[in-house]
Structure formats: C-alpha cells, structure tokens
Image (cartoon, grey):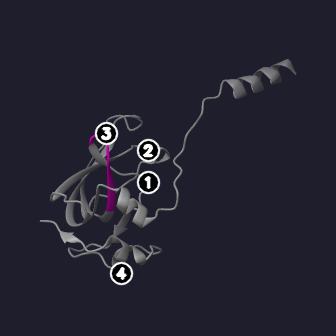
Amino acid sequence: MISLTLVLGALVFGATPSYACSCMPPEVPRHLKDSALVFTGTAKAVKRPKDRWDPVKPVVYTFRVDHAYKGKPKAVVTVSTHTQSAACGTHFSRGARYLVFAYKWEGRLSTNLCSPNMKVAHGKGPITVADLPKGADPKTIKQLGKPKKVR
C-alpha cells in the first residue's frame, strides 16, 4: 500500500505539464485581418534544423509567390513554423501550391497549424473556388478580395 501511495504521489507531484496545439476554427476574415501577408505560392525549398526536436529553431519554407491577397510580398518569400505539429507547426510539401497566411513573429514571417493555410490547385492565375481543396468554404475566395499578381 505504501509503494502504491509513493508511485501515485510521484505521478501527481512529479508530473510536468504537457502542451498541445489547440486551435479555434480557422476563420478566414479574422486571419486575413491579423496576417501581415496572405499569398498563393509554390513551396520550393525547406530548411529544417539539425535537431528536429529543437524547440527554438524553426523549419523555414521558401515559396515562389504568384499572387498577393494582403501585403506586398517579393517574388520569393520565406515563412517559418515550429518543427512539431503538437506545438502548432505546420507542413508544406515541396512543389505544391498553397494559400498561406503569414504573420510577423520575432522579426520574421511565420505561420502555424491554426492559420487557414491550404493546398490549392496548381496554376498561375488567382485561385478560384475550383482550386480549393475538398471541404473548403467557397466563401474563402470572396473573403480574400482581389489579388495582385506578384512578379
């Protein structure tokens, strides 16, 4: 009985808190307002820290931007995110085209799992409802507003 009490006490008092990413539903108008830059672009490169569990160093993705929905991006933009999805890090596949919502964090453009980033159809023109992934809200296109071509 004493050993059971000691084990339970160690579990209760010796436990450290754990955290996981928890997001509100991704509302495009709110994220559009809060983002420094919203664009469509193709993921061209990814730079990962040597230690994939490093809590400080981010994964950095390089995008070739084709259209801007907010802000004035250059043709090539780097966006960072946390290495782990449990810490709200997100993943982009090289060669795929995305709608990306990026905000300023510690002097760099960043994004996370809670942003309404989404993979969209390949193309060079502004995205349309047909370009959105299955299940995406068609109102997204109207909410984004008129895009500006990026050269």
Q: Which residue is mark 3?
A: 106
Distance from Cα at disc 2 to Cα at disc 3? 18 Å
Disc 1 is placed on an element classified as loop
In depth, the one of 63 and 74 nearer the eye is 74
Work out whether mark 1 precedes mark 3 in sequence or the reverse, and give the earlier one: 3
Mark 4 crowd level (few <14, some 14–19, many ≥20, 10 Å Cα): few
Q: Which residue is mark 1?
A: 113
Work out whether mark 4 precedes mark 1 in sequence or the reverse, and give the earlier one: 1
Magenta extent: 100-107
The disc placed on residue 84 is 2
Q: Residue most toward the bottom? A: 130
The disc placed on residue 130 is 4
Q: Quadrant of residue 18?
A: top right
Distance from Cα at disc 4 to Cα at disc 2? 31 Å
Report the residue at 60% width, 33% height from top: 17
Quarter containing the N terminus: top right
Q: Nearer the viewer, mark 3 or mark 4?
A: 3
Report the residue at 24% width, 72% height from top: 147
